[in-house]
Image (cartoon, rainbow, N blue to C red):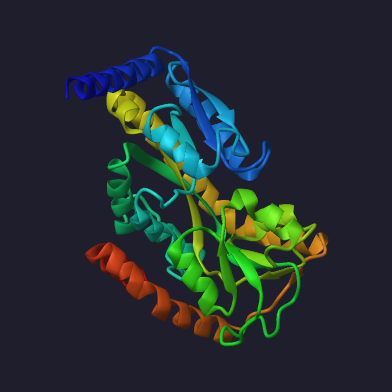
């Protein structure tokens, strides 16, 4: 018992030293999932420059692009333990599957709905904040990315008809809602992380993938030849910080961080839909065929997936899920 207590005290002491060191002027590490020079990288550079300038050089950053700090699920743990100060990206569901609320299939259908649903005061964001607080993580903002779709190496039979079995294995994120969505759309899901998706495409282990969008698939155009814009989910990346570090900051520094984060998010929402269209054009340039989906076909896909996935999310999330859905109805 004494050994356990001594070990616990050492861990607390080490974390305290780490936080104090971060506040003493050390340069913070902040990572994201895209290459240097990408849209998110440029926005994060602007965010960090703003924070540094407004804090009088008291908060400085080194930006680690392209998962250099590790896969997003790994960095999530590193931020929780204070090894990395901040990150901008998605959350993994290994610790708490309730965070899959953020990527509820067919939750929003337009950029206007998305901006309302992912606003700071929405129930979705409030619930996400509470889920992540238990992991020693504080959400301070986000970065809207795109509506998701399916990238394919070949054209399947009746791609826009979810009732037709495609006999195609596609990569899905290791999240249950994505697995069910893929099945309901007529595909066979194979759960692997994004890190291994490209390898799966090259080896033929999978014939496509879901969980990304046009912008992300452009980099895989050597293998991706068709894109099905099902808009199965809205991709939103969270900007977050170690909670102990956040609690140790002054009110002034907290306001600087949240203000810069809010500005970055608002500016991104203003250009995101145009950039998404540009990503579609880039796919065409790279020889990827955009498969058409009529409004009627989209509506049928949406209703079919919602009927299959939403009850399981309701079971996992309880009243939280219903409150998010009700908020969506109010905004409509």
- Residue sitting at 62 percent across and 43 percent down? 34
Q: In x, y percent, where is residue 65?
A: 61, 35
Quadrant of the drawing holding the N terminus: top left
| 50 or 146: nearer the viewer | 146
Left/right of residue 126 with respect to residue 86 in the rendered view: left
The answer to whether 88 is drawn above or below residue 297 in the figure is above
Q: Quick check: can you spot residue 264?
A: no
| 255 or 103: nearer the viewer | 103
Instruction: Say which quarter of the image contains residue 182.
Output: bottom right
Left/right of residue 133 with respect to residue 281 in the rendered view: left
Residue at the top extreme, as displayed: 24
- Residue sitting at 82 percent across and 60 percent down? 285
Instruction: Say which quarter of the image contains residue 13.
Output: top left
Q: Quick check: can you spot residue 158?
A: yes
| 128 or 206: nearer the viewer | 206
The answer to whether 77 is drawn above or below residue 314 in the figure is above
- Residue sitting at 64 percent across and 70 percent down? 169
Q: In x, y percent, where is residue 149?
A: 60, 67
- Residue sitting at 42 percent across and 68 percent down? 107
Q: In x, y percent, where is residue 52?
A: 48, 22
The answer to whether 107 is drawn above or below residue 3 in the figure is below
Left/right of residue 104 with respect to residue 124 in the rendered view: right
- Report the number of discs: 0
Q: In x, y percent, where is residue 296?
A: 56, 87
| 189 or 98: nearer the viewer | 189
Instruction: Say which quarter of the image contains residue 7.
Output: top left
Quadrant of the drawing holding the C terminus: bottom left
């Amino acid at each position: 018992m004494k050994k356990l207590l001594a070990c616990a005290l050492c861990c607390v002491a080490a974390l305290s030293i780490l936080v104090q060191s971060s506040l003493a002027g050390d340069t913070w590490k902040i990572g994201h999932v895209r290459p240097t020079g990408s849209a998110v990288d440029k926005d994060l550079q602007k965010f960090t420059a703003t924070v540094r300038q407004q804090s009088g050089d008291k908060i400085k950053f080194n930006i680690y692009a392209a998962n250099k700090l590790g896969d997003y699920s790994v960095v999530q743990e590193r931020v929780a333990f204070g090894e990395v100060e901040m990150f901008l990206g998605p959350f993994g569901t290994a610790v708490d599957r309730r965070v899959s609320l953020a990527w509820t299939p067919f939750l929003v259908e337009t950029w206007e709905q998305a901006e309302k649903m992912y606003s700071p005061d929405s129930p979705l964001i409030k619930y996400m904040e509470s889920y992540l607080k238990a992991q020693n993580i504080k959400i301070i903002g986000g970065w809207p990315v795109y509506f998701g779709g399916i990238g394919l190496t070949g054209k399947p039979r009746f791609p826009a008809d979810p009732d037709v079995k495609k006999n195609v294995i596609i990569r899905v994120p290791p999240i249950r809602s994505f697995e069910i969505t893929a099945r309901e759309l007529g595909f066979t899901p194979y759960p692997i992380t994004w890190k291994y998706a490209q390898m799966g495409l090259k080896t033929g282990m999978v014939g496509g993938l879901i969980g990304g969008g046009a912008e992300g698939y452009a980099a895989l155009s050597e293998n991706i030849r068709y894109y099905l814009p099902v808009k199965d989910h809205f991709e939103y990346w969270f900007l977050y910080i170690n909670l102990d570090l956040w609690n140790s900051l002054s009110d002034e520094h907290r306001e600087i961080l949240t203000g810069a984060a809010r500005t970055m998010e608002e500016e991104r929402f203003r250009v995101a839909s145009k950039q998404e269209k540009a990503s579609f054009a880039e796919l065409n340039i790279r020889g990827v065929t955009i498969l058409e989906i009529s409004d009627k076909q989209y509506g049928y896909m949406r209703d079919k997936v919602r009927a299959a996935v939403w009850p399981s999310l309701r079971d996992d999330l309880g009243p939280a899920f219903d409150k998010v859905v009700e908020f969506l109805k109010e905004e409509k």
